Image (cartoon, grey):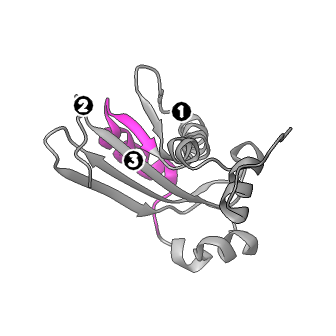
């Protein structure tokens, strides 16, 4: 792994959910947080989360998490303080952070716990990857046809 030159810890987040839109009442089912400290040490906080609702079969087909898997696990409300304490004043990162952080914000709002991304750097590895590996017609043409696309519009 490349050495990160951190001035404060960064927490990388990944979640699994009951659906694609927190505004439609979908909930977090699983959360994994990995903190990388400036000295290179790592800490992890991970848990299945009981969404207090039935998991749609379409969601289970994507991530494999079933209603039986989350039975008896903490709800987000019960687990939220651990997440807040773990994140502290860290910067945040992940792959597709808009999705994950949007859900996290919705869940914290539902619990009434203050959470903010203000005064944090947010690094979205997906945006970096797509900048380095463009996903557009010109890039596809170059990759699969072996030559630049002339006069693309």
Residue at the farthest top position: 119
* Residue extent of the magenta highlight: 73-93
Q: Residues within 10 Å of mark 1 (few under 14, many from 20)?
A: few
Give the residue number, with chain letter if any, for mark 2. 8
Q: In which quarter of the image is residue 53?
A: bottom right
Q: Which of marks 3 and 1 is in front?
A: 3
Percent across and percent down for residue 25 are: 73, 49
Residue 12: numbered disc: 3
Give the residue number, with chain letter if any, for mark 1. 112
Q: Quadrant of residue 123?
A: top left
Query: Is 58 placed above or below 3 here?
Result: below
Residue at x 74%, y 56% (from the top left corner): 141
Mark 2–mark 1 Cα distance, whole angstroms, equals: 27 Å
Query: Is 1 placed above or below 35 here?
Result: below
Q: Examine the structure image and report whether residue 122 is included in the region drawn in magenta.
A: no
Whether residue 93 is visible here, answered yes or no, is yes
């Amino acid at each position: 792994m490349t050495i990160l030159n951190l001035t404060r810890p960064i927490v990388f987040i990944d979640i699994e959910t009951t659906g694609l839109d927190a505004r439609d009442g979908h909930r977090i089912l699983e959360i994994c947080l990995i903190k990388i400290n400036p000295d290179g040490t790592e800490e992890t906080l991970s848990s299945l989360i009981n969404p207090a609702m039935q998991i749609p079969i379409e969601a289970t087909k994507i991530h494999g998490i079933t209603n039986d898997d989350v039975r008896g696990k903490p709800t987000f409300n019960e687990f939220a303080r651990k997440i807040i304490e773990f994140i502290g004043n860290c910067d945040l990162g992940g792959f597709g952070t808009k999705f994950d952080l949007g859900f996290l914000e919705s869940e914290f709002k539902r619990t009434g716990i203050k959470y903010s991304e203000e005064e944090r750097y947010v690094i979205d590895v997906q945006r970096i990857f797509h900048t380095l590996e463009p996903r557009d017609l010109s890039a596809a043409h170059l990759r699969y046809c072996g030559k630049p696309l002339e006069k693309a519009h």
